[in-house]
Amino acid sequence: MEILETLVEIGRNFYNRGWVLGTSGNFSAVINRGPLRLVITASGVDKGNLVPSQFLEIDGEGEIIAGAGKPSDETRLHLTVVRERGANAVLHTHSVWSTILSIKHQESLEIEGFEMLKGLSGIKTHEHVERIPIIDNSQDLAALAGRLEEVLENYPEAHGFLLRGHGLYTWGQSLSEARRHVEIFEFLLEATGRTTKF
């Protein structure tokens, strides 16, 4: 499946850039809408050495349709984004800057003035203010998914969100768009972090 090969390449690229070290991060992509089917990384796999067999096919309830292993613990978050945003791909990274900034800010992080903002879908000017909501992390994934649903409703223009002390989630209408959003956000987060006095 071509989509799996693309996800494998994304994993290796993100690992090499320090965004999904260890077994951190998780990736998903929609392969069918009726009924809803996603492929998602199995829990605990090294994203720098992904192979297609380390992805599971799941349904809209997060139940395994095909594949071996356990879906990511954060599968509910992927499904929430897919439903609320109509996304076809969801990518989650654990970079240093996304983690630091998620701790240093409260309800959201505002980024403006960078030309790179124009890499986000629908943004035409560097004067855009991207408001990235920050959600307190929790091991209660059902409650966390409920909180995410509220946040996505309250931030309808957001292209991503941060889990506090955890990392970045972003998405796209395609895998290439989601990948671009990760690259844009990671640039913006690092640039913001390096120019902020803590």
Image (tube, rainbow, N blue to C red):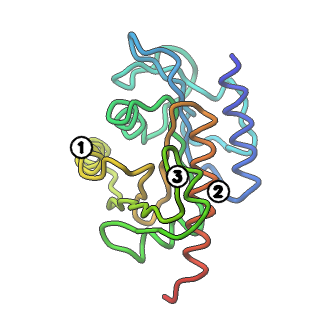
Percent position of residue 105, x then y: 38, 74
Q: What is the spatial separation of the Cα atoms under label 2 and label 1, in whole angstroms?
A: 26 Å
Marks 2 and 3 in Cβ contact (< 8 Å): no
Q: Amino acid at mark 2?
A: Trp
Asked whether 106 or 12 is in front, the reply is 106
Q: Residue at x 60, y 55 (%)?
A: 184
Disc 2 crowd, CA 10 A, few/some/many (<14, 14-19, 20+): many
Q: Residue at x 52, y 70 (%)?
A: 113
Disc 1 crowd, CA 10 A, few/some/many (<14, 14-19, 20+): few
Percent position of residue 9, x then y: 74, 36
Q: What is the spatial separation of the Cα atoms under label 2 and label 3, in whole angstroms?
A: 27 Å
- Whichever of callouts 2 and 1 sits on the residue coming sooner in the sequence is 2
Q: Amino acid at mark 1?
A: Gly
Residue picked out by circle 2: 19
Q: What is the spatial separation of the Cα atoms under label 3 and label 1, in whole angstroms?
A: 32 Å
Side of 147 relative to 72 (left or right): left
Residue picked out by circle 3: 124
Percent position of residue 97, x then y: 57, 69
**Residue at the limit of the structure toward the top, as seen here:** 34
Image quadrant where residue 134 sits: bottom left
Residue picked out by circle 1: 146
Q: Give the answer, above or below, for where 172 lies relative to 25.
A: above
Side of 96 relative to 87 (left or right): right
Q: Secondary structure at mark 1?
A: helix
Percent position of residue 188, x then y: 57, 65
Disc 3 crowd, CA 10 A, few/some/many (<14, 14-19, 20+): few
Q: Give the answer, above or below, for where 8 lies relative to 25.
A: above
Q: Secondary structure at mark 3?
A: loop
